[in-house]
Image: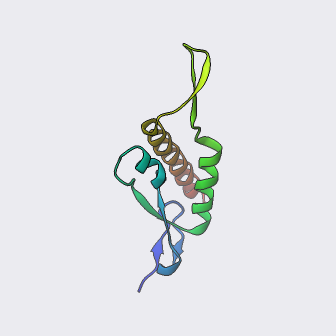
Amino acid sequence: MGKETCELCGYRIEPGAVEKHHTVPTKITEQAGMPESISVILCSKCHREVHTWYSENVFDMTYDSQTKRFKQKSMVEMVKEYEAAYRVFAAYKKVKRQKV
């Protein structure tokens, strides 16, 4: 059986060593009552990096200028937040990959 390729960095991986990553965590899509998000095949390094990226760039609170307070985002807003964060991370990895 041939090797698979990390969808972010292009690294060739043995089939048993690939990691499936949901662009939006399953618990978020379940709570939002939405179908499971798109999944991608990643190497372990990119998988760790994307989760670090999420922890640094995805926020579950938003500022309400009307009440001048922070409020919890809805699950639908969180889905959009994760989708946007993944798109930005994937674009970053694509640029980085092209420079190599």
- Which residue ends up furthest to the left in the rendered image? 35
Vertical comparison of 11 with 50: above or below: below
Display colour scheme: rainbow
Identify the residue at horizontal 59%, vertical 48% (top origin).
54
Vertical comparison of 19 with 27: above or below: below
Identify the residue at horizontal 47%, vertical 62% (top origin).
7
Task: Return the x and y of residue 64 as percentages of the image width and height.
Answer: 56, 20
Task: Return the x and y of residue 82 as percentages of the image width and height.
Answer: 50, 44
Q: In the depicted view, which residue is nearer to us: 33 or 89?
A: 33
Vertical comparison of 91 with 15: above or below: above
Q: In the depicted view, which residue is nearer to us: 35 or 87?
A: 35
Q: In the depicted view, which residue is nearer to us: 49 or 99?
A: 49
Q: Tally the marks.
A: 0
Q: Quadrant of the N terminus?
A: bottom left
- With 52 as the anchor, is 95 left or right in this view? left
Vertical comparison of 35 with 76: above or below: below
- With 95 as the anchor, is 77 left or right in this view? left
Task: Return the x and y of residue 20 as percentages of the image width and height.
Answer: 47, 66
